């Protein structure tokens, strides 16, 4: 930048020039020995110019700097942003609008502009500071080192791309082994039998309206009676159909299952030129197809699952092997969410691929799927964990943590779930996953789990060492997780983890019970004199989420305490009273209001998860016994891979 172009910035109103601007008041030049010589002024200008250049270089030329710039220069009101349509969740259980999580489908949540603006500014400041640090570190390297690092990264990515593009040999023939525990038996107790029949009727109501008003589209708008398609799936269609397959099967809705299978055979197409969420497509589509195959043995489901898995492989074409969040299905080009810290991938998204990808290798005979997710473990195990915790953000280029924000809810949740279930699904042979899970749980107990003044146990969020005493609906899955993992804990801790699961279940029940509609808000707080209550308008909605029912299901199976069936039935009655409409089931914008305000979306996970977990609570334990089946993050069923006998044996031709 020309020096003369900067001089006017330092001139006094009287034209005192640089010396006057730096020297003091009155617009007068400083005389005598204190006056700056011309050479000193020039040196100061050079230093200042170098600083400005460094700042602008950090903004414009570092990876993902355009995202930072857009947040600074082109910030728009949260009220004008599209609502996230995500489960986070996950997503993801990757998916809170306030956290930016697109996982798990947030429909129609009213915004809080002031809080959103404050969050955005804090994120921008932190990203800016990180960009400056990274720029400083890069400038300290020799040019030869920088060039070498770039060439090595390019070479690694190119090798991965060539390998993934190699012709897929096709699927080996398999001998399908009939699944264990999928034939439903009527409960002996008449009252329980009647309640289970009611839940099946709810499934029929949701399915028939989807079929009538939105068949072939992703989701149903039950109020306006039309289709709803989220950008999370790009141009892929039929999310509700694929998500509902295994629920239809276990509820013995045979005609509906055959209709769904026919649609998959004739219409499910992954050759689309559109960007999708890798996480959401994996848990809903890959998971749903795998589950349908393992239950029915229908070859079309195995074929489609592996075909989609191959389409997702380019997401892993990053220097570290940590996958992108978003992927164009045609070009194979990936990127991360614009709001993610420093262009990072999300823990709950890249950490929620393991179960499905291990089964893709199992069914295809191709180890590449397993290798991709095992590499994620390798990267994570090389990193230092702050206080033993896993931050929600990881940069796929550098392989380093982003913002130190830790959550067992949105952005983090299903990563921990998949560590535990990876160990269980391996027939308890994956000892690395077991160690990672219990080490993480120990850190969570130490730093995140707290007890309110009235005795409610909750899981706070950790932001750079400071706790935010907020717990999300997504976090409520953790009660079931703690209880499910109790059997693998050291003997002295097994009862403790079962009790911890029960305490989380009680807290989440209270979050339901303290609303007018007896359905839980998206998030609830433990500060300012309130407990288990949402205090912000953008946290008061309910979008048919399953996490509380999930924990009730595990707690019922593991303890048979009748209160879990009682609480589950309270939820059924609330769903019928407040969410059921003529055209299906709708989420609610505010669970504290006296009258319903609908968001007009019947989420696909309502059929995949919420109704499935409720149905299992009122079924006998021999339907999908936990010693034979693992539920993925979308409640899709995956069999345990026995070390002595595989569920599916590959035949030699």
Image (cartoon, grey):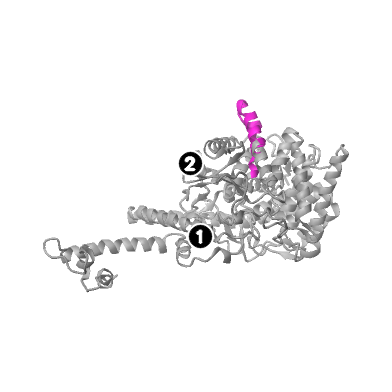
Quadrant of residue 215 within the rendered picture: bottom right
Residue placed at 34% from the left, 53% from the top?
141
Residue depth check, mark 1 versus mark 2: number of the one nearer the observer: 1
Q: Is residue 640 above or below residue 330?
A: above
Q: Residue 246 vs residue 231: left or right?
A: right
Label 1 SS: helix
Quarter location, residue 165: bottom right
Q: Residues within 10 Å of mark 2 (few under 14, many from 20)?
A: some
- Whole-percent x and y of residue 485? 64, 35
- Of residues 15 and 592, which is closer to you in this image? 592
Residue 42 image position (x, y, % from top left): 21, 65
Q: Position of residue 376 (x, y in %)?
A: 54, 46
Question: Is 538 on the left or on the right of 180, as rendered?
Answer: left
Say few, some or many: other residues with alpha carbon within 10 Å of mark 1 (under 14 / 14 to 19 / 20 or more).
some
Decide if residue 77 is on the left or right side of residue 6: right
When the figure is inspected, residue 420 is found, relative to residue 304, above or below; the finding is above
């Amino acid at each position: 930048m020309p020096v003369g172009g900067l001089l006017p910035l330092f001139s006094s109103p009287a034209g005192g020039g640089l010396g006057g601007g730096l020297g003091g008041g009155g617009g007068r030049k400083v005389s005598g020995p204190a006056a700056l010589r011309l050479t000193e002024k020039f040196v100061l200008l050079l230093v200042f110019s170098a600083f400005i250049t460094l700042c602008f270089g950090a903004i414009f030329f570092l990876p993902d700097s355009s995202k930072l710039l857009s947040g600074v220069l082109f910030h728009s009101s949260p009220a004008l942003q599209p609502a996230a349509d995500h489960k986070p969740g996950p997503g993801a259980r990757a998916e809170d609008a306030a956290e930016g999580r697109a996982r798990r489908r947030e429909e129609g949540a009213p915004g809080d502009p002031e809080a959103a603006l404050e969050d955005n500014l804090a994120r921008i400041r932190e990203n800016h500071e990180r960009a400056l640090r990274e720029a400083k570190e890069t400038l300290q390297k020799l040019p030869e080192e920088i060039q070498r690092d770039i060439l090595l990264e390019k070479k690694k990515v190119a090798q991965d791309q060539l390998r993934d593009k190699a012709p897929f040999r096709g699927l080996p023939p398999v001998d399908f082994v009939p699944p264990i525990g999928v034939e439903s038996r009527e409960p002996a107790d008449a009252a329980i039998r009647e309640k289970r029949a009611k839940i099946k009727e709810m499934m029929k109501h949701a399915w028939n309206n989807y079929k009538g008003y939105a068949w072939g589209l992703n989701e149903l708008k039950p109020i306006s009676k039309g289709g709803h398609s989220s950008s999370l799936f790009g141009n892929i269609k039929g999310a509700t159909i694929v998500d509902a397959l295994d629920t239809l099967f276990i509820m013995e809705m045979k005609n509906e299952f055959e209709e769904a299978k026919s649609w998959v055979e004739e219409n499910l197409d992954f050759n689309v030129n559109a960007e999708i969420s890798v996480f959401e497509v994996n848990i809903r589509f890959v998971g749903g197809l795998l589950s349908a195959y393992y239950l029915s043995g229908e070859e079309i489901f195995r074929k489609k699952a592996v075909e989609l898995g191959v389409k997702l492989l380019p997401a892993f074409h990053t220097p570290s092997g940590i996958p992108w969040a978003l992927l164009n299905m045609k070009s194979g080009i990936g990127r991360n969410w614009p709001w993610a810290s420093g262009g990072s991938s999300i823990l709950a998204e890249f950490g929620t691929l393991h179960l499905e990808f291990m089964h893709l290798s199992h069914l295809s005979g191709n180890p590449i799927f397993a290798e991709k997710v095992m590499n994620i473990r390798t990267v994570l195990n090389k990193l230092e964990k702050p206080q033993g915790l896993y931050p929600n953000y990881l940069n796929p280029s550098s392989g380093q943590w982003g913002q130190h924000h830790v959550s067992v809810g949105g952005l983090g949740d299903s990563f921990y779930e998949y560590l535990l279930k990876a160990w269980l699904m391996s027939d308890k042979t994956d000892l690395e996953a077991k160690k990672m899970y219990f080490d993480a749980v120990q850190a969570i107990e130490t730093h995140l789990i707290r007890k309110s003044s009235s005795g409610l146990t909750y899981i706070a969020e950790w932001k750079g060492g400071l706790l935010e005493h907020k717990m999300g609906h997504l976090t409520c899955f953790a009660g079931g997780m703690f209880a499910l993992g109790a059997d693998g804990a050291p003997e002295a801790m097994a009862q403790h983890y079962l009790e911890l699961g029960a305490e989380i279940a009680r807290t989440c029940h209270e979050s339901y019970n303290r609303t007018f509609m007896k359905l839980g808000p998206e998030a609830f707080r433990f500060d300012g004199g309130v407990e288990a209550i949402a205090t912000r308008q953008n946290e008061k909605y309910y979008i048919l989420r399953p996490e509380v029912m999930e924990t009730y299901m595990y707690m019922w199976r593991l303890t048979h305490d009748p209160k879990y069936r009682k609480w589950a039935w309270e939820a059924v009655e609330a769903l019928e009273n407040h969410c059921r409409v003529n055209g299906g089931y709708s989420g609610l914008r505010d669970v504290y209001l006296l009258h319903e305000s609908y968001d007009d979306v019947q989420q696909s996970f309502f059929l995949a998860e919420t109704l499935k977990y409720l149905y299992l609570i009122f079924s006998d334990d021999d339907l999908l016994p936990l010693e034979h089946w693992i539920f993925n993050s979308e409640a899709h069923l995956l069999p345990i891979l026995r070390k002595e006998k595989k569920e599916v044996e590959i035949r030699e031709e």
